[in-house]
């Protein structure tokens, strides 16, 4: 087997290098959040904690961040509610035009964001709707909707129908079976869909750029600031969000693997 | 968590669909109304806008309904190089992202199966870029590639780059940025198909005296094709419409402008709505044709 030793090492080394490549800009953003720069955060000046301690020294960054959170939460609620209902209909009922509905849901994902953004902007323009918070939220809920449907549908198709049958066999009413069995089992899928939706909304720039009017979200702030240099506070906020999300993912993975182990012991 | 949105579906348990289809329509109604209002009508608006004509003696940005099909000819003759660049860059970025992602996905999905913890850690690192601003990551590359960095100095010392050369603002940096930004979108769907790959097929291959290379070409690659198709689409479509990487304040310059940059400038700065709309319609049409042909040829129509 020794003649395969090169091949044996090649793949792991390649994989690690690819991951390092992915992480370089994240590390850069994190490191430069500690830069003692005055205005533009391009050249390394020195280490400081000031940016982390006074995140809102420049209130525009914080306001943009708050706007992004607001937009993300509202758009996620709309998309998750509408998307979950659609996913239930598509996977649990047989009806005419089912494949047409599937296609209609697939199209927004196959449309480049710039076309969605320009289309919505053209519509708001011709309808005389002023651009602002409402138009951003409407646009975000639209592109999140399809992703919610796909995620929840995948969860529904992995459910064991025997569980619901058991509920019906035990004389559970349709409502009882849904709320006591189906919905709790779907909840992880719905949560995943909501988190994905929030993440997509929070980082969206292209569609927002066409529909924001005078409202500044966090990505819009960075884009506008990019020409003259983004202040270190933006790096602080991005790094903090990053750490928070990574902790969330790790906790979710640890708890789900602990649960699997517990179930394996029981079984 | 988010993987379900990328790869194709997991093993589906066949469920007896219920018959009362009116309930289905009740569940679908709000979502369909939303899609009609914010997806279908915007498309119609886009097409109507693309045919508008300027108001006589009007101000900049004032247009009236018309059927000015010449708008299309005008934008194509004016901006065809931007279309070529957009699709050229997107194809190059898709290719490089595939080259980088496939071995990574193979390692996580097949080799690392024995170590679930390592697998989970690597997957978390693959999706890590999603959690930090796309724009800040692209700006980070811009700064790492700017003229006085050690990287550029080293390339100049090795005469790979001429003394007055730059890395940023070139086709190289734009393709580099696009490749980087879409690697997770390529890796995840390939990972989901490889993760389900039954390694007994590979053993069967080697039992029948196939070389590792033959086993890869004849077994692994065809079985991971659905993942490759979704991954390349998830990279190619957003890359061809992107305007951030090619923008002058990020990795591009005036000579790297893609069709996305023209749409952005025409719509938001020049207020030339018909031109922006016509360019968007053409972009969308080309993408639909490419995706249709590609999906047919690859033989995986079960994407959703």
Image (cartoon, coloured by chain):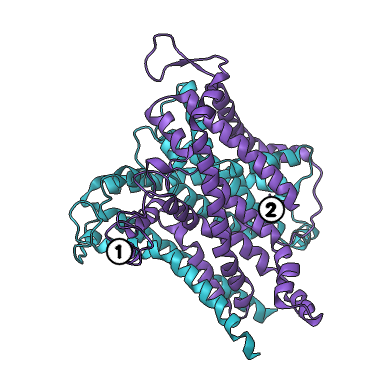
Chain colours: A cyan, B purple
* Front residue of this view, candidates A145 and B95: B95
- Residue shown at the point (37%, 44%) measured from the top left: B253
Residue picked out by circle 2? A178
| CA distance for labels 1 and 2 | 64 Å
Do callouts 1 and 2 point to residues on the same chain? Answer: no
Residue shown at 26% from the left, 59% from the top: B148
Q: Quadrant of the N terminus of chain A?
A: bottom right
User: Image height check: is A225 above or below B36?
Assistant: below
User: Circle 2 sits in a helix, a strand or a loop, which is it?
Assistant: helix
1 vs 2, front mark: 1
- Pointers 1 and 2 in contact (C-beta within 8 Å): no
Q: Nearer the viewer, residue A95 or A147?
A: A147
Q: Which mark is residue A2?
A: none
- Measured as percent of width and height from the top left, residue A158 is found at 70, 61
Q: Quadrant of residue A154?
A: bottom right
Q: Is residue B3 left or right of residue A61?
A: right
Q: Residues within 10 Å of mark 2 (few under 14, many from 20)?
A: some
> In the displayed structure, does residue B277 sit left or right of residue B270?
right
Q: Chain of mark 2?
A: A
Q: Quadrant of the C terminus of chain A?
A: bottom right
Task: Kindly tell me whether residue A181 is visible in this rendering.
Answer: no
Choose between A103 and B187: the one closer to the eye: B187
Chain of the residue displaying label 1? B
The local crowd at label 1, few if under 14, some if 14 to 19, many if 20 or more residues have their Cα within 10 Å, is some
Residue B46 in picture, x, y percent from top left: 55, 27
Q: Say which residue appears at 29% left-offset and 49% top-offset.
A: A62
Q: Position of residue B16 (x, y in %)?
A: 81, 53
Judged from the image, the secondary structure of the residue bearing numbered disc 1 is: helix
Identify residue for label 1.
B153
């Amino acid at each position: 087997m020794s003649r395969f030793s090169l091949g044996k090492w090649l793949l792991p080394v390649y994989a690690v290098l690819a991951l390092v490549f992915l992480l370089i800009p994240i590390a850069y953003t994190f490191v430069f959040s500690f830069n003692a720069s005055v205005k533009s955060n391009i050249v390394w000046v020195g280490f400081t904690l000031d940016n982390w301690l006074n995140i809102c020294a420049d209130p525009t960054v914080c306001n943009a961040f708050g706007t992004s959170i607001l937009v993300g939460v509202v758009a996620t609620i709309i998309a998750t509610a509408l998307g979950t209902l659609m996913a239930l209909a598509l996977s649990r009922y047989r009806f005419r035009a089912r494949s047409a509905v599937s296609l209609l849901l697939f199209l927004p994902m196959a449309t480049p964001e710039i076309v969605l953004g320009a289309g919505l902007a053209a519509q708001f323009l011709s309808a005389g709707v002023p651009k602002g918070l409402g138009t951003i939220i409407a646009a975000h809920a639209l592109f999140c909707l399809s992703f919610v449907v796909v995620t929840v549908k995948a969860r529904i198709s992995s459910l064991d129908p025997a569980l619901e049958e058991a509920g019906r066999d035990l004389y559970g009413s349709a409502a009882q079976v849904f709320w006591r069995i189906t919905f709790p089992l779907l909840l992880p899928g719905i949560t995943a869909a909501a988190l994905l939706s929030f993440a997509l909304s929070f980082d969206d720039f292209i569609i927002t750029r066409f529909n924001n009017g005078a409202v500044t979200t966090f990505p819009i702030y960075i884009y506008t600031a990019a020409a003259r240099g983004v202040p270190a506070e933006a790096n602080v906020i991005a790094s903090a969000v990053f750490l928070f999300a990574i902790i969330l993912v790790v906790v979710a993975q640890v708890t789900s693997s602990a649960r699997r182990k517990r179930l394996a012991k029981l079984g | 968590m988010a993987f379900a949105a990328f790869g194709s579906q997991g093993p589906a348990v066949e469920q007896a669909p219920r018959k009362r289809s009116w309930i289905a329509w009740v569940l679908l109604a709000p979502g369909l109304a939303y899609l009609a209002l914010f997806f279908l009508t915007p498309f119609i608006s886009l097409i109507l806008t693309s045919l508008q004509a300027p108001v006589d003696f009007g101000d900049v940005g004032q247009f009236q309904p018309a059927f000015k099909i010449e708008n299309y000819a005008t934008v194509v003759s004016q901006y065809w190089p931007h279309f070529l660049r957009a699709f050229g860059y997107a194809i190059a970025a898709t290719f490089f992202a595939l080259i980088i992602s496939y071995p990574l996905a193979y390692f996580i999905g097949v080799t690392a199966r024995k170590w679930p913890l390592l697998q989970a850690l690597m997957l978390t690192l693959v999706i890590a870029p999603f959690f930090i601003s796309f724009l800040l990551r692209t700006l980070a590359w811009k700064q790492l590639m700017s003229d006085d960095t050690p990287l550029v100095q080293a390339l100049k010392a090795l005469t790979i780059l001429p003394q007055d050369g730059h890395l940023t603002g070139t086709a190289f940096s734009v393709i580099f940025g696009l490749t980087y930004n879409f690697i997770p979108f390529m890796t995840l769907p390939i990972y989901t198909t490889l993760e389900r790959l039954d390694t007994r097929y590979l053993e069967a291959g080697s039992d029948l005296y196939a070389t590792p290379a033959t086993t890869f070409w004849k077994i692994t690659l065809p079985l991971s094709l659905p993942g490759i198709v979704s991954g390349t689409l998830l990279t190619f479509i957003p890359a061809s419409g992107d305007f951030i990487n090619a923008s002058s304040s990020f990795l591009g310059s005036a000579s790297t402008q893609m069709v996305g940059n023209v749409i952005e400038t025409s719509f938001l700065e020049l207020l030339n709505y018909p031109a922006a709309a016509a360019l968007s319609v053409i972009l969308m049409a080309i993408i639909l044709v490419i995706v249709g042909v590609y999906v047919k040829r690859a033989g995986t129509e079960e994407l959703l």
